[in-house]
Amino acid sequence: MASSALRDELDCSICLITYTDPVMLRCGHNFCRVCIDRVLDTQDQSGLYSCPECREEFQERPELQKNITLHKVAERLQEEVIGIFCTYCIHSPVPAVKSCLHCEASLCDKHLRTHNKSPDHVLTDPSTLPENRKYFIHKELLKYYCTKEAVCICVSCRLAGEHRGHQMEMMDEASEKKKKKKLRNLLQKLITKREKTEERVRSLEERRRKTQEKSSGEAERVTALFIDMRRRLDDLEKKVLSEISRQEKEESLSLSALIHQLEIKKDELSRKMRHIEELCNMTDPLTVLQEPDTGDLCDPEEGGGDEDTGGHDKAHDVDDLDMTVISDTFRTLCDIISGIRIYGEDPADILLDVNTAQNNLLISDDLKTATWTEITQNRPETAERFQKHPQVMSRRRFTSGRHYWDVEISRSGLWRVGMCYPSIDRRGHHSYIGDNSESWCLYGGRVSNNHYSVIHDMRKTQLPHQVSSNRFRICLDYGAGQLSFYELCDPIRHLHTFTTTFTEPLHAALWVYHGGMKIMGGTASRRNHHNRRNLP
């Protein structure tokens, strides 16, 4: 059998156990392949490699050469440790079932009977070599366990001064206590952790299944969306081409009629010109004088030099071709394309922050609806609460990504909806949403001439669109610096897009007067469905 000193030489200096697939560096030192690979991986970032044993440096990652001889020796040692045979069955080796620590021998069933009769012959499983059960200094068997030093000792160690007075236990007893107190508790903890890990795996698998289902559903929805888009685009193309063809035919017929009239007039003028030329070439003065007045040769209505414009009003110029239907079509096309982006995302869950609500705003229990009221709510005056104008901000803030949210607005009253920075003024006259550089909004209501307006930093722009719906969508692309407003009609209609560079987090913001506004969708809204208020 291999000696202890020899086995130590077969230990990897990194993992401190017997070599597994040993490889050698150029400096001659050996390591497990896995161990040295890990060390070299950690040195990749610095670009300088060195041997863990002698610190010799290499400019490039060294190649690993398999040490075949050391590999065979390590394998033989593993076989020797794992497969221990009976010491006395020399001619017919039989795997040993016990080792006698007193005799330092491995025994099979046949040779074990004698050793069972003597109490001095301590038996153990043959997985550990008997010489490993001895203290290397006293060369005596390890029998006791010092609880204070947590080490196994022999009889001489117990009698020596180093462990004198320490509490001792027999190794078997100490081993059983360790199994019961520590190992079994550890086993139970590991079992619990494994169960939690298995539960986590099941949860992740369920999540993966739901993700796959959602992805499949989204793919079907997008496919249906693009099929509908293609249908609508085909309809638009046919409509525009039909209108262009109709106008072309109408204009062509009008121009053809005018050309025919002008051709007739041209022939008549040519005839008159020839007659005048004949008169001019005559030498007989009597004939010339007897000819009727030449002024009668021109039509009375053609006098005054209007020949160039006669009949021009009967037909349009080509530049007068009506392009309105084409422009309307392109606007509809833009609305369709805009609809792709805003329908491709999940709605943000917006909840109103009561701590910012002005005292003339009533906030619903589900934090989704803001309604103007004459009854003051007597909320405490704080730095974050709006004091002058009936408006409120959202709890959630946005610092990145693309998001959208929908609102439904009452038909009565005035309203503003948009987004603002948390640094917006909460007290002054310019704390209106849109009346400062910290907010952007869409404005409308019963006294807005049935039109929408957008406001930022007190700059108000009236939009050409007339009010046709009371539901709107607000889309934020924080990274692109875009805040867009859409009217949720059929098809969805783009109203306006602010473009800027956002420098702070953004909150949703509402302002209502003599009316109400409700945020659509969101988990909280579904949980508190019974708390929703109906808008007037």
Image (spheres, rainbow, N blue to C red):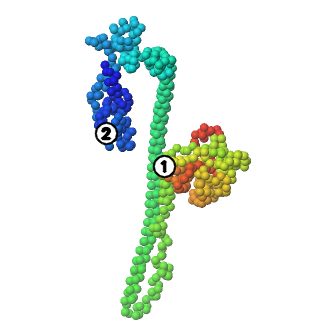
- Tell me the element at label 2: loop
Q: Amino acid at mark 1?
A: Ile
Q: Residue 163: x, y in percent?
A: 47, 19
Q: Which residue is mark 2?
A: 62
Is residue 518 visible in the rendered image? The answer is yes
Is any atom of residue 472 visible in this view? no
Judged left or right of residue 237, residue 428 is right
Q: Residue at x 59, y 49 (%)?
A: 508
Residue name at image x 40 percent, y 7 percent = 118
- Which three-letter amino acid code belongs to the residue tagged 2? Pro
At horizontal 42% and vertical 80% (from top left) the residue drawn is 269
Residue 158 x/y as whole percent:
46, 17
Taking 337 as reference, is 86 left or right?
A: left
Is the residue marked by circle 1 packed among few (<14), some (14-19), or many (20+) residues within 10 Å? some
Residue at 63% from the left image edge and 58% from the top image edge: 449
Residue that numbered label 1 is attached to: 340
